[in-house]
Image: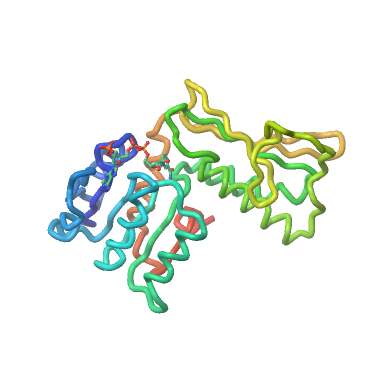
């Protein structure tokens, strides 16, 4: 049995994860940590793996604690940009013994959407990302949209793609959206959505859309369970589920 501590266990993703992990073969939840609980509970429960679904403001400290105490950690919390990854890398040193697996999106469909978007991006002149989430989401753009834009930009740079065509010269209200790694990203916050994203590609005389919709938080659970099972096999920092899924 792999012993798992869930941080943010009373939250929307944390509570769903507790249920999924307890139902999974070979995994058991030994600590459910909320906002008022000391992180020492991770050590005293004998957890080998921690899963963090807290808030961007505290997740980095949680990860640092886990690294310092030799606990492998799966990070689902948003906001692990290059700066934060750099902090974790410095903490781990040159010969890491633990793994920090940072997963911007646990949904298998979303992982495939990102993969397909990066594959398609060099074949089209234009590409934009539209992400649509529930109005309780506090950060924009989503971690998935940021990661998608970065993957698209990297694929286009490697292929030597031309800059995106865009004749806009005035946009005082930001109607063209944010720019992430040179890719326009648009964030919609509307009741009724859980997590959706569309990647719009355009070429001469054709458009191509890659769309993914999470209708329910259960869509993240197969990825959560796979990540918790796999973490620890590659000491150091891993970003995304691609390796875990063999993509
Ligand atoms: P949520 O419902 O607000 O849950 C967060 C939980 O963490 C709350 O119960 C909160 O307690 C608790 N918490 C805050 N500080 C803590 C601390 N220091 N130690 C332990 N627990 C603490 O949010 P959510 O919807 O579950 O989302 C959590 C994070 O996951 C967000 O960053 C979200 O963007 C991200 N997310 C990622 C994915 C993915 O696929 N990677 C999918 C969905 C969401 P209080 O409410 O008492 O403050």
- Give the image quarter of residue 50: bottom left
> In the image shown, does 149 or 27 lie closer to the viewer?
149
Q: Quadrant of ligand 1?
A: top left
Residue sticking out furthest to the right: 204
Residue sticking out furthest to the top: 191
Number of dots carrying numbers: 0
Point out residue 239 in the picture as x, y percentages from the top left corner.
48, 58
- Give the image quarter of residue 196: top right
Q: Is residue 95 above or below residue 168?
A: below
Q: Is residue 85 above or below residue 224?
A: below
Residue at 60%, 47% in the rendered image: 148
Residue at 39%, 43% in the rendered image: 222
Residue at 46%, 27% in the rendered image: 135
Residue sticking out furthest to the left: 44
Q: Is residue 169 above or below residue 234?
A: above
Residue sticking out furthest to the bottom: 94
| In-image side of 151 versus 222 (left or right) | right
Point out residue 3 in the picture as x, y percentages from the top left corner.
21, 55
Point out residue 23 in the picture as x, y percentages from the top left corner.
25, 41
Point out residue 36 in the picture as x, y percentages from the top left corner.
19, 44
| In-image side of 71 versus 187 (left or right) | left
């Amino acid at each position: 049995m792999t012993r798992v501590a869930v941080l943010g266990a009373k939250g929307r993703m944390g509570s769903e994860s507790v249920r999924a992990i307890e139902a999974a073969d070979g995994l058991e939840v030994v600590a459910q940590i909320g906002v008022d609980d000391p992180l020492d509970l991770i050590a005293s429960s004998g957890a080998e793996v921690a899963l963090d679904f807290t808030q961007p403001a505290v997740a980095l400290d949680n990860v640092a604690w886990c690294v310092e105490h030799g606990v492998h950690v799966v990070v689902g919390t948003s906001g692990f940009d290059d700066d934060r990854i750099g902090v974790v890398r410095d903490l781990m040193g040159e010969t890491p013994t633990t793994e920090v697996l940072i997963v911007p999106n646990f949904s298998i469909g979303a992982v495939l959407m990102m993969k397909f978007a990066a594959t398609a991006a060099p074949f089209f002149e234009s590409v934009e990302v539209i992400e649509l989430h529930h109005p309780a989401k506090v950060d924009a753009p989503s971690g998935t949209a940021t990661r998608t834009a970065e993957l698209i930009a990297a694929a286009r740079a490697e292929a030597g793609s031309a800059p995106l065509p865009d004749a806009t010269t005035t946009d005082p209200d930001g109607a063209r959206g944010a720019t992430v790694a040179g890719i326009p990203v648009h964030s919609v916050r509307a009741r009724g959505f859980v997590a959706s994203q569309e990647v719009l590609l355009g070429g001469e005389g054709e458009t191509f859309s890659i769309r993914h919709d999470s209708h329910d938080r259960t869509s993240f659970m197969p990825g959560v369970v796979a990540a918790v099972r796999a973490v620890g096999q590659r000491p150091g920092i891993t970003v995304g589920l691609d390796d875990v899924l063999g993509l």
